[in-house]
Amino acid sequence: MAGETLLKSNIGTLKGVGKVRVELFRKLGIDTVEDLLYHFPRRYEDRGNIMKIAEIVPEESCSVLGTVTYPPVNIRSQRGVRLTRSLVKDGTGTLEIVWFNQPYITSKLALGKQYIFYGKAKKTSRMQMINPTIIQLEDMDKECVLVPVYPTVAGLTQAVIRQTIRQALDMLKDIEDPLPESVLRKYRLADFGESIRHVHYPKDMESLEKARRRCVFQELLEFQLALLSMRKQDNEAAGIMFNKSTLTDSFIKSLPFELTDAQHRVFNEIYTDMTLPKTMNRLVQGDVGSGKTVVAVLAMLVAAESGYQSAMMAPTEILAQQHFNTVSRLLEGFPFRVALLTGSTTAKNAKEILSGLANGDIHIIIGTHALIEERVQYHNLGLVITDEQHRFGVKQRALLSRKGNNPDMLVMTATPIPRTLAMILYGDLDISIIDEMPPGRIKVKTYVVTEDYRERIDRFILKEVGEGRQVYIICPLVEDSEMIDAYSAVKTAEEAAAKFKDCRVGIIHGKMKPAEKEEVMKSFAEGSIDILVSTTVVEVGVDVPNASLMVVENAERFGLAQLHQLRGRVGRGKNQSYCILFNQGSSEVSKERLEIMTKSTDGFYISEQDLKLRGPGEFFGTRQHGLPELKIANLYTDMNILKEAQECSERIYRYGYLEKEEYSRLKDRVYHFYNLNFGGLL
Ligand code: ADP
Ligand code: MG
């Protein structure tokens, strides 16, 4: 089949891809063979790294070549889990291998025979490998290489994805390059066909690097071109010129605290923008607890005074509710009506709010994604604010501002993005930084501990609660899992209720209904829960000043930037606060990483260190920043490529090259990218 036709055909035309798999692939955003080629591996397993059993490093993946010296047997553990166990020797030591829920494994291993086992080892009383992949010796050449691991969904195994991609690559003889010759030459990019093959099936590290650079460049180029075309649409109309405010001074005087210099400065920058006839596009960056909310309230006050409506969108119901409480309290005594609209607003209330928004009775609306629903119409929306921008997409931000007639826009985030990167990503935004904490904050004392400290920490929890304060216990999982050996909120809450009999224990996690979550958060904020066991749902913005202790289970499983956000939930009041990080991992790196948390409270520093230690790929997912989902590029580590792609995109855009014949394939890709990420906006 001709390359182009095959690329555009549905993946259902491939062997082994029936109706069910077509649906599964669709969940991954894959419809055509071309989509499949652009489904890049998330990482690679280096199965060629064969280690002696004696040299195995716990928690790191490796291959072991060994002889089965104890026949695999199926057993049932005390907790009812089905296990298969066997022993393997290689002359330097013995390795125990264990599989969960795969009893058929017994038929795959013969006593006395040699195999390669690939997996992650763990040190218990002896060295143990859980759920390893078995590789037959005769397949060593084929299998002991860099094996791609793809993003997937339940029901679609790695093996199926690998086979399907391999099949497509085998069928495609030459694939036409979406980039024109001149771009390839100027940026020294490898040929597309070769790159795409090597990205999926690298020969070695070197060929992978080269191929990856090419694919990253292309993706970032598509991204930048899509951004450029979106900005063009947004920048055409003139902005609102708000009146000089007479209320902000008295508002600032009425606050129970003095604004910091940084808050003053940032508000002045906003105020200047608002009172000029241009459209404000401003990003306010400020570390957790730096006091962004009150700055937002000031801006909304300016808008309301000029007779315009403001909308403030938060990523979670909890946060929206909290902002609503704060804003209502701060604006008490001002003649403006504030309302809350979220997914769990009752139909009756929603109806009333919608009409209040449409006829202008409501001046300030706080809410979640509900604010951008089709049915929400504004009378004269003049200011839109998104809080914790990293949780939203570029698209949601744009949808909200399109509810008004070119309203001013304020974007707030606590995620420390290096300034240079922010300029490239949010090229259209001016940046204000709140680089000062309100005075009198006592630094949170942070300790990294191991399981040996359990009793002491339990006593510490009791002591804090005894003194009338509140505690968070953070767990990585919602429920116990057979596959992942980590603390879950459900189990931990049960145990805490049994252990701390006199304390009121609550639980909150992402699987609960919004109304339930809100109820729990409300009780915690009111002080009728002493110990709140939670997953990372409390990560963003929640403000309960009486909480003075946070205990994080399996802290090694979290990113440092995330731990920093979590830790920001305590230390918000007058009392000395503490953050206890349980390190249940055994690797040196995780210990070193966690120690960083004890040394610094500076979000920028912490994320830089995290990036250094964890290296590429594992830092933040791009999704956390509300950016389009990139399939291969990493916006942090691929900074140099990003700059080149930006330069290239600007030239293409400026000279209208996309209209030229040799760019037609790239133009298709840009539209594709645009629809996928900013869909519905054209
Ligand atoms: P964030 O920047 O993380 O969104 P918030 O706006 O939630 O921070 O503010 C955190 C806490 O600090 C709130 O309880 C707020 O009332 C308080 N706060 C804000 N500004 C000041 C200030 N200048 N002085 C004292 N407390 C302040
Ligand atoms: Mg906030």
Image (cartoon, rainbow, N blue to C red):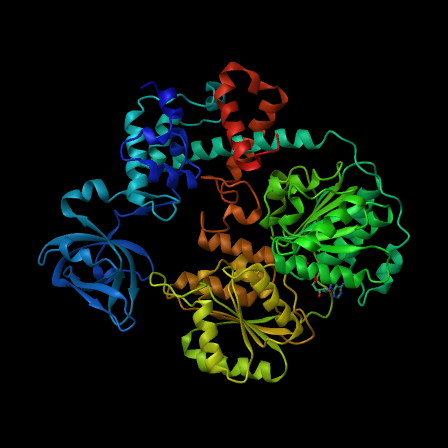
Q: In this view, does 660 lie to the left or right of 5?
A: right
| Residue 181 appears in the figure | yes
Location of the C terminus by quadrant is top right
The residue nearer to you, when weighing 595 against 653, is 653
The residue most toward the right is 246
Q: Is residue 309 left or right of residue 554?
A: right
Q: In this view, does 675 lie to the left or right of 304?
A: left
Position in image of residue 300 (x %, y %): 79, 51
The residue nearer to you, when weighing 311 against 174, is 311
586 relative to 136, above or below? below
The residue most toward the front is 348
Position in image of residue 263 (x %, y %): 76, 56
Instruction: Identify the residue at horizontal 75%, vertical 43% (top origin).
Output: 378
Q: In this view, does 578 lie to the left or right of 213?
A: right
Image quadrant assignment for residue 122: bottom left
Q: How many marks?
A: 0
The residue nearer to you, when weighing 88 against 15, is 15
Image quadrant assignment for residue 465: bottom right
Position in image of residue 328 (x %, y %): 77, 61
Image quadrant assignment for residue 152: top left
Instruction: Identify the residue at horizontal 17%, vertical 43% (top origin).
Output: 139
Instruction: Identify the residue at horizontal 77%, vertical 52% (top origin).
Output: 364
The residue nearer to you, when weighing 44 against 26, is 26
| Residue 40 appears in the figure | no
The residue most toward the top is 661
The residue most toward the left is 112
Location of the N terminus by quadrant is top left
Q: Quarter of the picture for ligand 1?
A: bottom right
Position in image of residue 230 (x %, y %): 63, 32
